[in-house]
Amino acid sequence: MKATRRLVGAVAVLALVGAACGSDDSSSEAPDSAPADTEAPVDTEAPGDTEAPVDTEAPVDTEAPVDTEAPAPPEEEEYVPPSRGDADLVIWADDTRTPVLTPIADAFAADEGLDVQVLEVPFDQIRDNLSVTGPAGEGPDIIIGAHDWLGELVSNGVVLPLDLGEDAALYADVAVEAFTYDGALYGLPYATENIALIRNTDLVPEAPATFEELSDIALGLLADGAVDVPLAIQQDPGDPYHNYPLFTGAGGYIFGQADDGSYLPDDLGLDSEGSLAAAQKFAEWSESGLISKDVSYDIMNESFSTGRAPFAITGPWATGGFADAGVNFSVEPIPSVDGGTPQVFVGVQGFMISSFTENEDLAKTFLLDYLNTEEVQLELFATGGRPPAMLSAFEQVADDPIVQGFGLSGQQGAPQPSIPEMGSVWESWTDAYNLIFTGSDPVEAFTSAATAIRDKIAEG
């Protein structure tokens, strides 16, 4: 398979992610606007009427003493990770990966005459607790984690570089790029994920050659009353993560990249010529009815599951539901936009070494000699559902058409930026899409967003 970026690993039908791009894949729900750990804006208000009904006719004793202070709700108990005890080497892993890693750690312990422990820590607790427990000597030597943690971890000096040497060539380029920060590699990749185009093969038997052809087909089906949602791509009200392949296909970019794939925070591209042209395309797609700001994840999921949408742009977290609903579908790369190649955001998970470890050499030996194998990559895929980042391992699971489809889509992708500056992007970018979808000038929307993002970055 050929592509501008060589990613043979992508997401499988079994892969499940939390809300993205993100990071706890034990959840069955899709991200609201970006994978976890990207600091995307989150709507914390639950829907519904929050006011309880009041009986205005009930008698009230106005002379009775009233305690105006309601009892405070119990404080949420702070998570405390398990103690490392006297172990020589400790690995923190979530409940999905722990069963795979434990026998490997036991074998390493037996070979080296050491006490090696795999301690189960919830995925969403690993990053923060590493920074807390590490300086006190109570933290792990090795963690599993997402590549988009690197901006924080490297900046805070809590992870160490890892030299894979010639073995770097065993892995998909995009996986190695994802764990490269400021020119240094910081992780051993084991899994990847990304979105793709999902096509209802009963409604659209042949894959469109271009996005323009896709648009014509989708809007034609809408005009005929055959579908309700021509392109099921979640917005509610704007979604930079899911829009990214269309944004890049139309000529846009968010941060420039160095030759090694590292992102350049000084090169924000949201108001570049290509990005402003992409903004205008989104205005056209909104005006034509192809893309709607009102499509949430639930609407995307329901419309495609019921055969009322011919196309969806989503990830493998949704495909299991489509299959359960009896929809015949195909997974494939998003076709070219005005001749441009769409790039999806690719998320990568891997193993990282804590800078607080007192056994750096042991940690490196465990990663390079015991986890850096095709067998382990396949076991992690079978348990967690994320395709292997190692090329030879992926080739053994890529006969599944869904895995293959996400893989082809990922070949066109780029690592989701892990630089801290990305945290300043999501909110303003989301607002810009919402402005476009509600009729504002697209060039002004993206230009204003770029100014706001630069100001946020400058403020630190």
Image: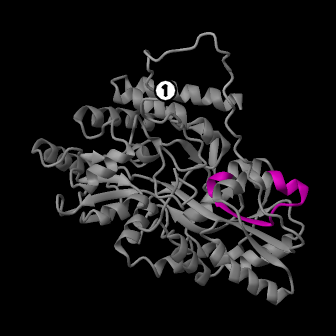
User: Which quadrant: the C terminus?
Assistant: top right
Question: In this rendering, does residue 419 appear at all?
Answer: yes
7 relative to 108 in the view: left or right: left
Query: Which image quadrant for residue 404?
Result: bottom left
362 relative to 224 in the view: left or right: right
Q: What element does badge 1 sit on?
A: helix
| Residue at 62% over, 51% down | 258
136 relative to 259 in the view: left or right: right
Residue 99 falls within the magenta-colored stretch:
no
Q: Residues within 10 Å of mark 1 (few under 14, many from 20)?
A: some
Please name whichever residue, 325 or 408, is drawn nearer the observer in this view of the structure. 325
Please name whichever residue, 119 or 221, is drawn nearer the observer in this view of the structure. 119
Position of residue 410 measured from the top left corner of the image (x, y, whole percent): 45, 61
Residue 264's place in the image compared with 389, above or below, is above
| Residue at 50% over, 24% down | 448
Position of residue 281 measured from the top left corner of the image (x, y, whole percent): 33, 36
Query: Which image quadrant for residue 173?
Result: bottom right
Residue 141 falls within the magenta-colored stretch:
yes
Position of residue 391 measured from the top left corner of the image (x, y, whole percent): 53, 76
Please name whichever residue, 110 or 64, is drawn nearer the observer in this view of the structure. 64
- The residue wearing badge 1 is 447
Magenta-colored span: 132-149
| Residue at 73% over, 52% down | 79
Hey, what amino acid is under mark 1? Answer: Thr
Residue 256's place in the image compared with 369, above or below, is above
